[in-house]
Image: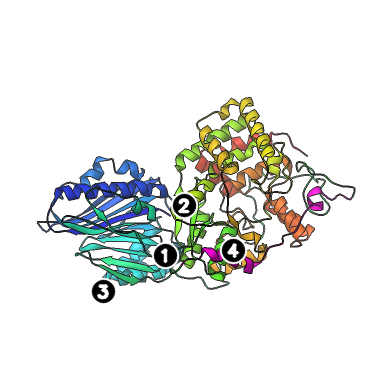
């Protein structure tokens, strides 16, 4: 998920101009790695001078890599090393998961007793390892530190560097691509259990070595007039290499991550989650609901006939998937030989995209590249589940990270503007920042020369009420599924709201316009998996819980929307004002599919619609607004019932 880069090689003799070129290459790689995370960065260098003395030093800071490489501290790493026999350099751009970026020991490179390591991925079984591994006593918040400590222990026991890395990676669950330097030994170790690692030979007069990065484009875009570069080569899942003092590259096999025995997940959803004492609950009076599904008459454009059956039920068409054999036929033209990836998959970390990857790899033998667009509200839970899936399936995971601080400021500006004139129809504005993932899907398809992009969108997750509250009758379609006239009406509604509340004209405006364009104007030619597969909740949950130890939320019984940091907030507003949420639409579709009876659906929706307090507080904290003040605004809005 984070960006890691490395340079390793040897000099025949001291050449100052070569070192300057290497510094430029390193800085360029660091800047490009920033697309993986901007919340912190760091670098470490190991080199041996002509006098035989080893320099082993570096820096790390809660600033983006582009700022780090322009600092005097970064320049000082490369000074006084004009005459060197060997070089090892590692760099890191951090997307924060475990541990706050403003605490130095939570940033990378990770340092421990003469070792420096950068890690791309997430270790999801750190708590279990703490209980069984004495060497992890005093472990920081940073999950990556567990890997370097385990490597250190194995080195002390007499294992070689590659053996120690394999022992450590066999003990973890999750994803890990690592670059390791030792103070007392030249060269570098690189290893990956999910394929997020690439390398490229580099040569100039008097120097030969390698550039290494967690993403293909970081190396492919590297140019320098003083160097000859080889082809970018992918290190697939389960491959490592140890580069020694003479730049010889010795490959070795990396074990897969630790697997969770089927049926032993500790993360199974349990009964209703009680609301903490003192937090406001929501009690909705009896509403007139469809007699077949559970939608209330506050649902926009809902028409109930003389039998009390709603128009959506009357016009509903059940899933009629084409079948897995037809899916295999549709994918067949895109299969590639060997380890070459053959499709790009949008991967939110939610249950549907997770299940879709399972089917693609396990049932159909595809070799996907996964990508996630992190706009600042992908939760740590979602990231851990991404690591579980990608680790066990050995999948490369591309994380495209926005400027998270800016995105969150934009959300805060729009929430505060909305609070001055709250309208239920404009709530999707809070999620505008995530819509660029369509644009990045198209860009990455071209970058990786993938002719097909696969989406696993649950066909029962229809949310037409969101546009309905804007006066646009979308019927039963998906949120983005409607025609030109409807799009024009939606744009007119938003334009009117902006004119009525000028506070929306803030620094987020360009981002919002870009989001509208990404949502409704760009081409979306994707293969939808659930056009071919029947979506059924119990089957999906069983696979994820039994085979991947998929983690559920502590404040919600359902496995849906638990990786989306915004869902708890906007569903609170919908429930308080309209008496229903996305849960009601989803459960109603399950009734129409014959997957739930109406009584069970009512009970589930009532439980799921109660405030998700833990998620609400997390959302307010990370966005930076006063939760109680905003909820007071929501509570004061006119009810639709």
First to last magenta residue range: 307-336
Mark 4 touches mark 3? (CB < 8 Å): no
Q: Please report contact status of discs 2 and 4: CB closer than 8 Å, yes or no.
A: no
Q: Which residue is mark 4?
A: 330
Q: CA distance from mark 4 to mark 3?
A: 52 Å
Asked if disc 3 and disc 2 are in contact, CB closer than 8 Å, the reply is: no
| Residue found 35% across the figure and 54% down from its top | 4
Whether 416 is drawn above or below 176: the answer is: above
Query: Is there CB contact under 8 Å for labels 4 and 1?
Result: no
Does the segment drawn in magenta span residue 470? no
Q: Is residue 324 magenta?
A: yes
Residue 138 visible somewhere in the drawing: no
Query: Mark 2 to mark 4: distance in Å?
Result: 20 Å
Q: Position of residue 448 (x, y in %)?
A: 44, 55
Label of residue 16 in the image: none
For the image, the number of numbered tags is: 4
Q: Which numbered disc, 3 or 2, marks the residue that appears first in the sequence?
A: 3
Distance, label 2 to label 1, CA atoms, is: 43 Å
The residue carrying mark 2 is: 446
Residue toward you, 40 or 274: 40
612 sits left or right of 405 in the view: right
First reached walking from the N terminus: tag 3 or tag 1: 1
Which quadrant holds residue 547?
A: bottom right
Q: Quadrant where the N terminus lies?
A: bottom left
Mark 3 highlights which residue? 158
Classify mark 4: residues with Cα within 10 Å, few (<14), some (14-19) or many (20+): few
Which residue position holds label 1?
130
- Could you tell me which quadrant the C terminus lies in? top right
Residues at marks 3 and 2, CA–CA distance in whole angstroms: 46 Å
The tag earlier along the polypeptide, 4 or 1, is 1
- Circle 2 — which element? helix
């Amino acid at each position: 998920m984070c960006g890691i880069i490395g340079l390793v090689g040897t000099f025949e003799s001291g050449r100052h101009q070569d070192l300057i070129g290497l510094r430029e290459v390193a800085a360029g790689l660091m800047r490009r790695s920033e697309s993986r995370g901007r919340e912190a960065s760091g670098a470490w260098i190991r080199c041996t001078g002509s006098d035989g003395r080893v320099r082993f030093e570096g820096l790390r800071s809660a600033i983006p890599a582009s700022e780090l490489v322009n600092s005097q501290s970064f320049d000082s790493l490369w000074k006084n090393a004009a005459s060197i026999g060997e070089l090892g350099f590692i760099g890191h751009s951090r997307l924060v998961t475990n541990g706050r970026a403003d605490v130095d020991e939570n940033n990378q490179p990770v340092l421990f007793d003469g070792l420096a390591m950068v890690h791309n991925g997430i270790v999801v079984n750190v708590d279990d390892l703490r209980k069984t591994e004495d060497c992890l006593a005093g472990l920081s918040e940073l999950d990556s530190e567990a890997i370097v400590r385990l490597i250190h222990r194995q080195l002390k026991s007499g294992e070689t560097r590659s053996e120690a890395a394999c022992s450590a990676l066999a003990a973890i669950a999750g994803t890990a691509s690592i670059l390791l330097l030792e103070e007392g030994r030249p060269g570098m170790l690189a290893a990956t259990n999910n394929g997020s690692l690439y390398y490229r030979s580099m040569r100039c007069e008097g120097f030969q070595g390698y550039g290494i990065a967690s993403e293909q484009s970081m190396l492919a875009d590297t140019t320098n007039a003083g160097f000859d570069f080889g082809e970018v080569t992918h290190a697939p899942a389960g491959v490592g290499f140890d580069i020694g003092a003479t730049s010889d590259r010795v490959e070795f096999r990396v074990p897969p991550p630790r697997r969770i025995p089927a049926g032993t997940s500790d993360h199974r959803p349990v009964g209703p989650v009680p609301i903490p004492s003192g937090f406001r609950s929501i009690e909705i009076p009896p509403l007139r609901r469809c007699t077949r599904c559970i939608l209330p008459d506050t649902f926009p454009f809902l028409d109930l006939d003389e039998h009390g059956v709603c128009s959506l039920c009357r016009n509903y068409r059940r899933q009629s998937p084409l079948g897995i054999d037809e899916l295999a036929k549709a994918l067949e033209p895109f299969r590639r030989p060997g380890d070459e990836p053959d499709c790009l998959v949008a991967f939110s970390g939610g249950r549907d995209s997770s299940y879709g990857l399972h089917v693609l790899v396990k049932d159909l033998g595809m070799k996907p590249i996964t990508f996630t667009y992190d706009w600042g509200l992908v939760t740590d839970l979602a990231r851990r589940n991404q690591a579980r899936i990608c680790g066990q399936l050995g999948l490369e995971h591309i994380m495209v990270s926005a400027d998270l601080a800016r995105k969150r400021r934009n959300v805060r500006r729009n929430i505060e503007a909305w609070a001055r004139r709250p309208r239920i129809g404009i709530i999707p504005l809070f999620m505008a920042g995530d819509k660029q993932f369509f644009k990045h899907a198209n860009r990455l398809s071209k970058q990786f020369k993938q002719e097909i992009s696969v989406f696993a969108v649950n066909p029962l997750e229809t949310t037409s009420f969101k546009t309905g509250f804007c006066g646009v009758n979308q019927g039963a379609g998906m949120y983005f599924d409607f025609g030109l006239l409807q799009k024009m009406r939606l744009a007119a509604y938003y334009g009117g709201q902006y004119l009525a509340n000028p506070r929306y004209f803030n620094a987020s405006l360009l981002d919002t316009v870009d989001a509208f364009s990404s949502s409704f104007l760009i081409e979306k030619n994707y293969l939808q998996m659930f056009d071919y597969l029947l979506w059924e909740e119990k089957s999906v949950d069983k696979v994820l819980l039994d085979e991947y130890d998929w983690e559920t939320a502590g404040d919600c019984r359902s496995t849906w929307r638990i990786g989306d940091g915004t869902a708890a907030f906007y569903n609170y507003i919908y429930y308080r004002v309209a008496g229903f949420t996305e849960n009601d639409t989803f459960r109603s579709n399950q009734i129409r599919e014959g997957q739930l009876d109406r009584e069970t659906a009512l009970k589930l929706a009532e439980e799921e619609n109660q405030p998700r307090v833990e998620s609400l507080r997390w959302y307010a904290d990370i966005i930076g607004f006063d939760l109680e003040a905003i909820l007071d605004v929501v509570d004061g809005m006119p009810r639709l019932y």
